[in-house]
């Protein structure tokens, strides 16, 4: 059976971060830009004519245009300014989704029937947005991804033709920048080339993220929508003892609601791509707005969108006009998909990942003791084992500079495996005698065989060293003399050996 994507209309106000800052003033008359993390996020047409581009470093943009007006991005302000636009389009359709401030989507099938076709619907959306004082571009296609690209070129893509429409676009249009870069390096430069690959091969090579991107390139939804479980209410609600006329207490409650929402979805093995924010006021009136995310909505993403919406409603005096304020806040999940799972990363500063890791480690410490879970840090040292510092979780790391002078440090490359304790081995010459290292750090005898253990003897094909090392020579009680040697065997294996107290030990394996 052929899978079809629903018809979607996307309305886009170009450069909304700048439009939200400048208001109704014609943006072409100003040389202005909005920045985020010291890079250009959006610019007026006049600034773009002077060479200012999205993603450009702020310093480079100011060098091109000395009089450039610069504004820091505020998503909260963008959401507040976009609310009248969403209201204007929402009057034309029964259901509307905000993807982000400046970009919205409407299910096109039912709305087109009501307005006499897709073309009249698109014209009415453009007229409604322009009536608020802002320019608008509209696109209609099968699936949200294709509709967003269609809005850029103001096009209505015929039903069933989205894959052909998408084919010439570069893979850089995919939201996953790492995947797009990998595809480009593999010679897959367009969405059409990527879509032509077999789905099974894409899943094997690129995993779940690649499968979702491959579906988008073929004009499908990133993940197949699943039906709502029968008889199960996945929405969450919190009612307040006293009505609120300010957004702040509602925002505080929204985080807890978002966590409850995700707990319920996880229990059903589901995730959601859309969430509807509903408020009920003391006079019985209600307000609702649906928000969508490009991926699967996380707890943080849900809470953030609820905050945007609540602050936008407060800015436009919804709570004050509604008699008595807000008495209930409700979140309703929509666009249900199978939960794909998430791999959290401690390296990215993810607060949710860090909090979950700390709770798990605390449980392990309670069972096994404080020193059981450790963190590992690469520090300075001469031997490979000395450079790895293990510190109990939560304790301060030992200060040992990795870039400091370490005379006698083992040259690169480092072994791939380092045992916790050096293991005794025997290095023999052709007559079966142990190879010795003299006081001048010279090998007495030619290494011929390396006995690693019972039944494991390797012929020596080559060696490098020995490198002498004398540590803590100023303390006779702790002084240590060592010599290290790299040895390769005729079977291709390579080892790091150290002679300590007249005996050879295995300190590292280069091939394990």
Image (spheres, rainbow, N blue to C red):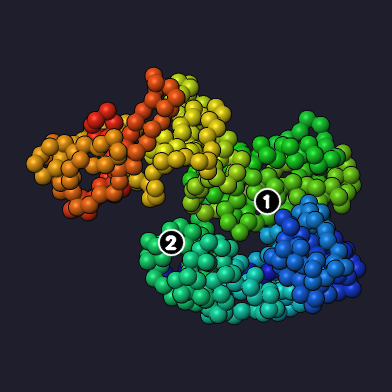
Mark 1 vs 2, N-terminal side = 2
Number of labels in the image equals 2
Q: Position of residue 32 (x, y in %)?
A: 84, 66
> Along the horizontal axis of the image, is 438 left or right of 166?
left
Q: Secondary structure at mark 1?
A: strand
Label 2: which secondary element: helix
| Nearer to me, 410 or 480 | 480
Name of the residue lying farthest toward the front: 440
Q: Horizontal and vertical percent for residue 152?
A: 69, 75
In-front residue for pair 141/300: 300
- Residue hosting label 1: 276
Nearest the viewer among 75 and 479 is 479
User: Disc 2 designates what residue?
Assistant: 206
Residue 255 at what x, y percent from top left? 68, 39
Q: Give the distance between the C-alpha atoms of the residues marked 1 and 2, in whole angstroms.
A: 32 Å
User: Where 151 falls versus 341 (above or below)?
Assistant: below
């Amino acid at each position: 059976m052929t899978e079809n994507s629903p018809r979607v209309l996307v309305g886009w106000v170009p450069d909304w971060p700048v439009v939200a800052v400048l208001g109704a003033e014609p943006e072409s008359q100003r040389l202005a830009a909005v920045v985020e993390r010291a890079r250009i996020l959006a610019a007026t047409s006049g600034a773009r004519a002077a060479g200012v581009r999205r993603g450009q470093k702020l310093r480079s943009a100011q060098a091109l245009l000395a009089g450039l007006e610069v504004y820091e991005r505020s998503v909260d302000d963008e959401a507040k300014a976009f609310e009248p636009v969403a209201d204007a389009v929402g009057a034309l359709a029964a259901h509307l989704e905000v993807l982000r401030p400046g970009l919205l989507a409407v299910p096109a099938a039912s709305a087109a029937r009501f307005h006499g076709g897709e073309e009249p619907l698109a014209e009415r959306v453009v007229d409604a947005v322009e009536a608020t004082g802002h320019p608008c571009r509209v696109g209609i296609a099968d699936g949200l991804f294709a509709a967003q690209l269609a809005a850029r070129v103001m096009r209505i893509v015929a039903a069933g033709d989205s894959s052909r429409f998408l084919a010439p676009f570069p893979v850089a249009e995919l939201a996953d920048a790492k995947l797009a870069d990998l595809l480009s390096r593999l010679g897959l430069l367009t969405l059409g080339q990527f879509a032509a690959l077999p789905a099974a091969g894409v899943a094997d090579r690129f995993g779940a993220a690649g499968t979702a991107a491959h579906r988008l390139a073929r004009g499908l939804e990133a993940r197949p929508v699943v039906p709502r479980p029968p008889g199960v209410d996945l929405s969450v609600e919190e009612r307040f003892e006293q009505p609120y006329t300010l957004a702040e207490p509602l925002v505080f409650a929204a985080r807890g609601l978002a966590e409850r929402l995700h707990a319920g979805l996880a229990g059903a093995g589901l995730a959601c791509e859309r969430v509807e924010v509903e408020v009920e006021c003391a006079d019985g009136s209600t307000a609702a707005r649906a928000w969508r995310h490009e991926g699967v909505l996380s707890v943080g993403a849900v809470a953030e969108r609820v905050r945007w919406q609540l602050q936008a409603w407060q800015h436009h005096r919804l709570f004050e006009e509604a008699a008595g304020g807000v008495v209930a806040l409700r979140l309703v999940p929509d666009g249900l998909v199978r939960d794909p799972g998430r791999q959290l990363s401690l390296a990215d500063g993810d607060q949710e990942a860090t909090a979950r890791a700390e709770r798990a480690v605390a449980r392990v410490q309670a069972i096994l003791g404080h020193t059981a879970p450790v963190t590992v840090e690469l520090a300075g040292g001469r031997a490979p084992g000395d450079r790895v510092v293990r510190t109990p979780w939560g304790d301060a790391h030992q200060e040992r500079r990795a870039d400091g002078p370490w005379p006698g440090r083992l040259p690169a490359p480092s072994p791939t495996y380092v045992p916790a304790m050096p293991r005794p081995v025997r290095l023999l010459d052709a007559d079966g005698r142990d190879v010795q290292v003299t006081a001048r750090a010279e090998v007495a005898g030619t290494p011929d065989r390396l006995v690693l253990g019972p039944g494991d003897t390797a012929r020596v094909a080559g060696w490098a060293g020995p490198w002498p090392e004398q540590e803590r020579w100023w303390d006779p009680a702790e002084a240590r003399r060592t010599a290290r040697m790299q040895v390769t065997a005729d079977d291709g294996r390579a080892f790091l050996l150290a002679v300590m107290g007249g005996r050879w030990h295995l300190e590292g394996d280069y091939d394990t």
